[in-house]
Image (cartoon, coloured by chain):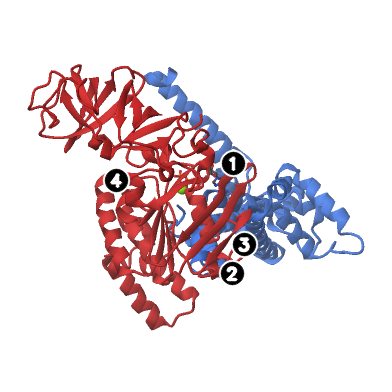
Chain colours: A red, B blue
């Protein structure tokens, strides 16, 4: 069943919680709503579920306009941020609640409850009360309760936010498995955690200040972010100010050849245009403020003294000769287990720090050392700077 | 500072014992003693007897007890139903209306009960609603006073519950009635039972408004105590007080049991 939102706007008094959201989720598709706190993700979910009525716009389920249909008659499964298991009912009765509301025969209720509890691995706990369960177990019951009514649409509001890091990783795996068990269900998954969105979603919708900024398949959004906000929010990209020149872009007085703005990488086509005041002025325009966007792990770093065994394979050394290397200084290093996060500044660009991830095992320059920072052109994209 | 030294502690405890003992505990003991006293001329009562208690449990005085119980249950029950209903309604009402309801329900707490009694007497002693002289005016007086407490207790509990429960229940296909009976009310049960026991306890002891409105046929126990004392029958009044105390304690404890495990979050 397809969910379609058309220009959905939600106001709470003076606050605009959601502004002109257009979104379509196909049957069997998972769309993640990703955005910082207060960006309107939960509000979008509540509008789909019918808990809040949009002040403008329409919501469609399988081609039928449900904007004025109460939640009880939408048949959508919802897992809210704090689970909201009914505290006075046992696990089995929580799960059975929707089935009993639909006046299903006793035998069928029992069979279906056993089935979904089995699916989420909670069959042993059917007789417990919610307060006798851990956070992760409560979360599973909340999902089982939503799935029991066999909803064609499942809405999940930060289902992992209340769990610790280890449990979160485990549950992420379980959710992926669950996704395969309900292949036809349209899922909207709200999160502010980019790794959850990347792991689960077919498409990611990035939200900010009540608006949808970008929406695209997860891989596209990651490799070629359409906006500066998405680039930094999804994967923490480096954003370096550049100017367009003949044959490439100019960064800190040096030209990176072969990179040019494309219409597709400019904002405006995903509804987020209002944030990029400078962005719209046209594909290939020369004067607009552009940012070069590159992921921390794509940057190669080498000692500027120029030994061949340095981190990068570019043995030449001496930053000046390399077409896409910039001289800089390493100002900080953080070991993160599997990799190290290095912070550099490019000479002539002291205000912008460049984050570089280097896998553990490669030898690292000393903090304070002069380094050569290589930006492989195939890993770079251009985004418009925000007009602020 | 005083509390940290040993003499300081002793002084504090003595002060506490004096205040609590003399002002709270001693009157109870004295009433109990008076209830069983044949005469009390010296410092201590003498010639113990159970005749006062027997008197308190027979005839007119026993009738007073049943009147009190009926009034408390009728008024208390109605107060809980109306108070819960009002609290639920105010929760979903527009803000200004909810604030108005809040203020309205606090009125009987702020207004002296004698004034409440007098206004009911004046209002219901004439057409179109003539209740003066019936038991209903007493029940209504109690209802008016107790509904404020019921409303307050339930509204406070409602404020602490999250709308998410009702929303999720609705999304699972439950009708508004099912959400009310199977989710909202069970989750409010502890507050509702608290409200009921508070209402009944208060109603059992109410005098101020009752004395303004009661007809001769519907005299509550506290009013009897007042009347007996007025006529100088202090010992019988003491025995009745003891009965009143015992019955109220039993009622409140029983209701508290009913509350069972707390399911509030
Ligand atoms: N019932 C409400 N009344 C008034 N304002 C509200 C209400 N619900 C949400 N808002 C406001 O709407 C905006 C969006 O809220 P929303 O809950 O959708 O954010 P969110 O993206 O889910 O954030 P989080 O990640 O913290 O859950 C916020 O500014 C919030 O303060
Ligand atoms: Mg939220």
Mark 4 to mark 1 CA distance (whole Å): 58 Å
Instruction: Kindly identify which chain the residue marked by label 2 belongs to.
Output: B
Kindly identify the residue that appears in the image at 37 percent across and 37 percent down.
Answer: A260
Callout 4: SS: loop
Instruction: Kindly identify which chain the residue marked by label 3 belongs to.
Output: B
Callout 3: SS: helix
Q: Is residue B48 left or right of residue A213?
A: right
> Which residue is nearer to you in this view: A201 or A123?
A201
Q: Is residue A233 left or right of residue A177?
A: right
Callout 2: SS: helix
Instruction: Kindly identify which chain the residue marked by label 4 belongs to.
Output: A
Q: Nearer the viewer, mark 4 or mark 2?
A: 4
- 1 or 3: tag closer to the N-terminus: 1
Give the residue at mark 4: A164
Image position, residue A300 (x, y; %): 20, 31
Contact, CB < 8 Å: mark 4 with mark 2?
A: no
> Which residue is nearer to you in this view: A333 or B131?
A333
Report if the beta carbon of the residue with label 1 is closer than 8 angstroms to ligand 1. Answer: no
Relative to A98, is B117 above or below? above
Mark 1 to mark 2 CA distance (whole Å): 50 Å
Contact, CB < 8 Å: mark 4 with mark 1?
A: no
Give the residue at mark 2: B177
Determine the image quadrant of residue A144: bottom left
Give the residue at mark 1: B27
Neighbor class of circle 2 (other Cα within 10 Å; few <14, some 14-19, many 20+) is few
Mark 4 to mark 2 CA distance (whole Å): 38 Å
Residues at marks 4 and 2 on the same chain:
no
Give the residue at mark 3: B54
Instruction: Kindly identify which chain the residue marked by label 1 belongs to.
Output: B
Mark 2 to mark 3 CA distance (whole Å): 50 Å
Residues at marks 2 and 3 on the same chain:
yes
Image position, residue B155 (x, y; %): 60, 51
């Amino acid at each position: 069943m397809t969910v379609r939102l058309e220009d959905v706007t939600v106001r709470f008094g003076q606050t605009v919680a959601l502004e002109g959201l257009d979104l379509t989720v196909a049957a069997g598709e998972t769309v993640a709503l990703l955005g910082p706190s207060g960006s309107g993700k939960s509000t979008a979910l509540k509008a789909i579920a019918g808990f809040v009525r949009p002040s403008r716009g329409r919501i469609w389920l399988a081609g039928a306009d449900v904007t004025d249909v109460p939640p009880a008659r939408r048949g959508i499964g919802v897992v809210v941020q704090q689970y909201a298991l009914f505290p006075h009912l046992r696990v089995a009765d929580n799960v059975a609640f929707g089935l009993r509301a639909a006046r299903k025969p006793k035998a069928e209720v029992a069979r279906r409850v056993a089935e979904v509890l089995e699916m989420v691995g909670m069959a042993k706990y059917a007789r417990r009360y919610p307060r006798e369960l851990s956070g992760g177990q409560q979360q599973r019951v909340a999902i089982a309760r939503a799935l029991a009514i066999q909803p064609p649409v499942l809405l999940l509001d930060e289902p992992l936010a209340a769990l610790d890091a280890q449990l979160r990783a485990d549950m992420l795996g379980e959710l992926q498995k669950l996704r395969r068990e309900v292949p036809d269900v349209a899922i909207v998954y709200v999160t502010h955690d980019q790794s959850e969105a990347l792991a689960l979603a077919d498409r990611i919708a990035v939200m900010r200040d009540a608006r949808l900024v970008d929406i695209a398949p997860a891989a596209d959004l990651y490799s070629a972010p359409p906006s500066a906000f998405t680039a930094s929010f999804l994967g923490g990209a480096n954003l370096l100010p550049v100017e367009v020149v003949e044959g490439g872009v100019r960064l800190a007085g040096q030209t990176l050849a072969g990179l040019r703005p494309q219409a597709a990488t400019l904002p405006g086509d995903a509804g987020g245009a209002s944030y990029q005041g400078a962005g719209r002025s046209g594909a290939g325009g020369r004067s607009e403020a552009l940012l070069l966007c590159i992921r921390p792990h794509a940057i190669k770093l080498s000692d500027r003294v120029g030994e061949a065994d340095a981190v990068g394979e570019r043995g030449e050394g001496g930053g000046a000769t390399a077409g896409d290397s910039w001289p800089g200084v390493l100002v900080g290093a953080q070991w993160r287990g599997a990799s190290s996060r290095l912070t550099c500044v490019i000479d002539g660009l002291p205000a912008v720090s460049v984050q570089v991830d280097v896998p553990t095992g490669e030898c690292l320059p000393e903090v304070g050392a002069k380094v050569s920072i290589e930006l492989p052109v195939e890993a770079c994209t251009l985004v418009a700077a925000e007009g602020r | 500072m005083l509390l940290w030294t040993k003499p300081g502690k002793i002084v504090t405890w003595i002060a506490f014992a004096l205040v609590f003992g003399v002002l709270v505990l001693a009157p109870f003991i004295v009433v109990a003693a008076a209830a069983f006293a044949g005469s009390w001329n010296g410092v201590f009562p003498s010639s113990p007897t159970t005749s006062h208690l027997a008197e308190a449990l027979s005839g007119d005085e026993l009738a007073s007890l049943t009147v009190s119980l009926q009034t408390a249950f009728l008024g208390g029950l109605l107060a809980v139903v109306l108070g819960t209903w009002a609290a639920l309604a105010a929760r979903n009402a527009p803000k200004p209306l909810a604030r108005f309801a809040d203020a309205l329900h606090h009125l009987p707490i702020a207004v002296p009960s004698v004034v409440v009694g007098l206004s009911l007497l004046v209002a219901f002693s004439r057409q179109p609603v003539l209740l003066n002289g019936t038991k209903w005016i007493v029940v209504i007086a109690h209802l008016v006073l107790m509904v404020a407490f019921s409303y307050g207790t339930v509204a406070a509990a409602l404020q602490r519950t999250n709308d998410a429960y009702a929303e999720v229940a609705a999304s699972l296909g439950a009708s508004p009635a099912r959400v009310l009976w199977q989710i909202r009310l069970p989750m409010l049960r502890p507050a509702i039972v608290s409200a009921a026991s508070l209402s009944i306890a208060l109603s059992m002891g109410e005098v101020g408004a009752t004395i303004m409105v009661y007809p001769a046929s519907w005299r509550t126990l506290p009013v009897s105590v007042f009347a007996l004392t007025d006529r100088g029958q202090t010992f019988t009044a003491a025995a009745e007080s003891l009965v009143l105390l015992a019955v109220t304690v039993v009622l409140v404890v029983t209701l508290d049991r009913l509350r069972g495990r707390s399911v509030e979050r």
